[in-house]
Each structure stands twice: as C-alpha cells, then as structure tokens.
Amino acid sequence: MIRMRRGVVQKITSQRTGISELLVELEGGLQKAVNYDSLTGEVVAGDEVILNTTAVYKKLGTGGAHFVLANLSNTEIDVPEAGHIMKLRYTPYQVKVLSVEEQDSPYAELMQQANSLEGTPVIIGTLHSMLAPAAAALKKLANKQLKVVYLMTDGAALPLTLSRLVWELREKGLIQHTVTCGHAFGGDLEAINVYTGLLACKHVLGADVILVAMGPGIVGSGSRFGFTGVEQGEIINAVNLLKGKPIAIPRISFADARERHRGLSHHSRTALGTIALTKATVVLPKLVPEKLELVLQQVEESTIAHKHDVAIIEGQPALAALADYQVKVTTMGRHVEQDPEFFLAAGAAGVYVASLI
C-alpha cells in the first residue's frame, strides 16, 4: 500500500536535470519532497500535488523526503514519439524510453554487431558511494585522459537523477557519460539489461573504463542472500562472458556496528565467494596489520582467494584525489574520516585500474 497525502508546493529548493527538490505544505507544516520531471512533469510554487508519504511515515532510509505522485495543477503531459520500451512496466508510473538496442535507436545497427568488451576494465561496486573514490583515482592517476562511463543498475534507486553524487562527478569531469539498465532510468543512454548496458558503454560511448554500481539505497535483510548487492557476482559473470576485465570492489568497514559487516562484509563474502562463478580481480586496500589480517582471513574462509585474483593496493592516493576534487561523499551516513577503510577499498580499485591503462 501507498500512504498518500495532498500538499501544496511552497518552494523549489533545488533543481537538476530531471528532478526538483521541494518544500511542500503538508499536514500543518513544511516538509521536503521530490518531483521527478520525467514522471510527473514540472512543478512550480502553488501547485497542488499528491504525495507518496510512506517512507517518511515509516521512518525508512529512502531519503527523508516525500515523492510527488501527481501534480493536480498539471494533469496532461505528452511524451516524445521515439522509443517504445517501457521501464517500471505495468505500474502506474511505467515510463517510455528510447532504448539503445531498439530499432528506433540511432545505435541499433551498432548494437546488433557488438558482442565483446574487448578487454575493457570494468570496476564493479555494490554501494553507490563507491563510485566517488574509484572515479577520483582514475581521473587523478591515469596516464591519459580517460573516458569513464557509469552504468547504473536497478538494484536500488531507479531514477539516476536522484543521485547528487553522479551529478557532481559529471560536473567535475570524473565521469563522462551514464547508462541506466533494467528498470533504472535517466541515463544518457537507456539499456534493457546489464549486458547491453555494458556493450553500449564500450561501443556507443567509447568507454576506456566502465564503473558499474546500483544507485543510492541498497536493499538488505541481514540474511545471506537477501540483499541486492548479490548482483556484483552476476555482473562479474556478465563481464567475463563479454570478454571484459572485471575488477571487484569489496565492501570493507571497521566503523559499522553490525558484526556481519565488520571487516569484509558478508555481502562481499556472498557475492564474490558464492554468486560469482567466474574470476575477477578483487582489490584489497593496504590497511594496518591487524585489520588487513582479519580481512585476509575472511577472504580465505569465504573461498574468494581460491576463486579470484587478489591484489593488495595502496588506496590513499584515491582519498587524496577526493580531497583535491573537493568531493564529499558518505556511506551509511559516515564520512571518509569516520569509515576510511570503506573508501580505501573503493579507491584502491581505481588506483589499480589506473596502473593498467
């Protein structure tokens, strides 16, 4: 069920392409809301809107804002003619896109021919925040101007425009293009699945390096297989099938109070140790001896060391690059200083790939 309430837009507090952040008068006070322009059209102050208030009401971690379901002041919206692929299919919010593979696409013939990543490095993360240190390291350390393309999966948030981080990374030149696959939408290109998403990154957008991760808001349950980060193992398999070079970012933390995420997260132990059926390079960051010893023990016990190539790389240059580019990023509400090992792991993957280019 969806908890719905009627509100009135009082102020637009921020706008990026495809998204407006609002203050709405609702239930006797001013509250935050988000409007996706590609779903419900543009809004202005004074518009009366219907809001999905479920997540805020339940105090869930989906952004602390309501979402506009309908703008009662703007009830008729037209769509471009091109394209016939629907995302969010068979919901009231199914949205039409021009997918890179379909016949109306200017890239249809190219995508018919594309079948290999031709050895392109593909850095695969599980949390959205992993993008920043990996991209910063690539930008700072690579020997040439790289074209870095971000492929966003549908494991978490579906609208790419929700991500302030992606907007910032593009503004600062750390990533050049975006592709959204599955039910995720809003990228420079739309793709039906991760396979064609990867091929579009390479052959349509000319990626030198591909970064793959879900959007903000991973789903987890505390159970072994009950989290959307299992996709990391599946994407490793896809990259190998397409003859790319998969590089996996492990989820490492010594700041998370949950024991299952201490050291090498159980997410990584499952995705890399069980779900991945083919080999990747798993990049671990250099850590103080007692922390690295625990992570290496977990890598060994989870069969990761037997299944994959493991590289231990200094991740500090990535954190320095984040500071140089003035990118402030958090994971689970924690800044770099509060959870350095998490960001060192993601950054080490970028450092490693930069050394290959």
Image: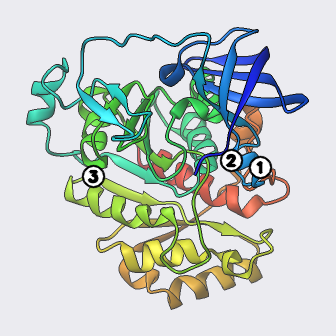
Q: CA distance from mark 1 to mark 3?
A: 44 Å
The amino acid pointed to by label 2 is: Thr
Q: Which is more N-terminal, label 2 or label 3?
A: 2
Q: CA distance from mark 3 to mark 2?
A: 41 Å
In depth, the one of 337 and 107 nearer the eye is: 107
Residue at 60% from the left image edge and 46% from the top image edge: 2
Q: Which is more N-terminal, label 3 or label 1?
A: 1
Secondary element type, mark 1: helix
Secondary element type, mark 3: loop
- Mark 1, Cα crowd under 10 Å, few <14 / some 14-19 / many 20+, is few
Looking at the image, how many numbered discs can be counted on the residues? 3
Q: CA distance from mark 2 to mark 1?
A: 5 Å
In depth, the one of 243 and 55 nearer the eye is: 55
Residue 98 in the figure: left or right of residue 104: right
The reply to whether residue 286 is in sight is no
Q: Nearer the viewer, mark 1 or mark 3?
A: 1
Picture coordinates of residue 51, whole percent (x, y): 67, 32
CB under 8 Å between discs 2 and 1: yes
Residue at 36% from the left image edge and 48% from the top image edge: 121
Taking the view exactly as shown, the residue that stands out farthest to the bottom is 301
User: Which numbered tag is attached to residue 279?
Assistant: none
Report which residue position mark 3 lands on: 244
Q: Quadrant of residue 115?
A: top left
User: Which numbered tag is attached to residue 54?
Assistant: 2
Residue at 71% from the left image edge and 41% from the top image edge: 53
Picture coordinates of residue 209, whole percent (x, y): 40, 40
Picture coordinates of residue 179, whole percent (x, y): 39, 33
**Which quadrant holds the C terminus?**
top left
User: Which numbered tag is attached to residue 57?
Assistant: 1
The amino acid pointed to by label 3 is: Gly
Q: Is residue 77 above or below residue 88?
A: above
